[in-house]
Image (cartoon, rainbow, N blue to C red):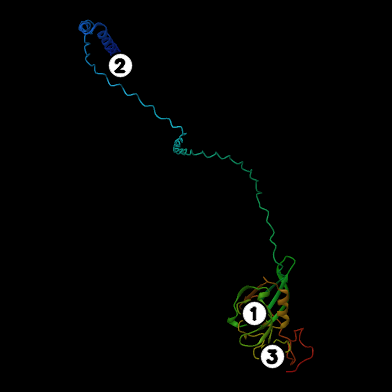
Amino acid sequence: MKQRIILATVLVVAAAVFAIVPVAVQVYGSGDVAVFSALYSPAPTPTPTPTSTPAPAPTPTPATTSTTASTPTPTQTPTPMPTPSPTPVATPAPTPTPRPRPTPTPRPATPTPVPTEEPDLPYYLYVEKGSFTLTIYGKDENGEYTVVVAAYRIAHGGNKTPTGTFTLPGSSGRERWHQFPAGGWTQFATSYYPGLYLHSPMYFSPNPNDLDPRYYDGDKPIGSASSGGCLRMVTEAVRFIYYNCPAGTQLKIVNGSPLGTTSPPVPDRNGMLHDPTDIEAAPTPVLY
């Protein structure tokens, strides 16, 4: 900037000089012009050696400010770092509180027996195959089966009739009338062994007045080893057992006659076709 001011000043002085020269010519004439020119011609101004003007440093252009409100660049939301799961710390098991032990109740030296309620079994049945006798025993004052209630003549099957002690069944093992597979009917059948019964004489049909006399006092009479293993007896005897000896009643059968029991023969039927001991048979005799 300073150099530009100096240059302008020089130009202004030069211009003033050149304006004075024509005026001098007119006043003094041409002859004096030379003198004047010589006197007043300014010594040539030495041309200054141009100093290299350093290139002005470019003035930085200010950034244009946009009048339009710029949309701010959305700030990037930093991805949240996963929070590390805390390492589980094992909780110590609580110390169990000891339970107070109950004070044991001292037991008596001799335990008191608890009475067991036994079923009411008023009778005991005993059979001696040697004497063909069934004896019905009742209880005495001590509860022992020593009282003879009745004794009846029977027919059995010899070796087909098993020995031992048997237990009579309930209603499921009893039939008012039972029919055998080989034919024939019998009353008040009570099972004592699979397929074997205590029963009445045989009948042709389930009718108390339709007796088959062969199995009463005929060729296979009561009082003989003539059955298929059953115990056959008069109707009065099996009727009593059927109604009065409940389930659980014991029946004992032995070979021979160790107690020497005896029984009367069967009543005479007098030609009638029913058992004289059967209270349900017809009162009017039916002749054979």
State how far apart marks 2 and 3 are (Cα).
177 Å
Relative to the observer, which residue lies in front, 138 or 261?
138
Taking the spot 26% from the left edge, 8% from the top edge, the residue there is: 24
Q: Earlier in the sequence, mark 1 or mark 2?
A: 2
Residue 172 visible in the shown view: yes
Q: Which amino acid, by three-letter code, is at mark 2?
A: Arg
Residue 260 visible in the shown view: no
- Residue 94 falls in which quadrant of the image? top right
Rendered position, 159 above or below 54: below
- Residue 173 falls in which quadrant of the image? bottom right
Q: Where the C terminus falls, by quadrant? A: bottom right
Q: Which amino acid, by three-letter code, is at mark 1?
A: Tyr
Q: Which amino acid, by three-letter code, is at mark 3?
A: Pro
Q: Earlier in the sequence, mark 1 or mark 3?
A: 1
110 vs 67, left or right, is right
218 vs 1, left or right, is right
Q: Are marks 1 and 2 in contact (CB under 8 Å)?
A: no
Q: Which residue is mark 3?
A: 213
Q: Earlier in the sequence, mark 2 or mark 3?
A: 2
Q: Which residue is mark 2?
A: 4
State how far apart marks 1 and 3 are (Cα).
19 Å
282 vs 112, left or right, is right
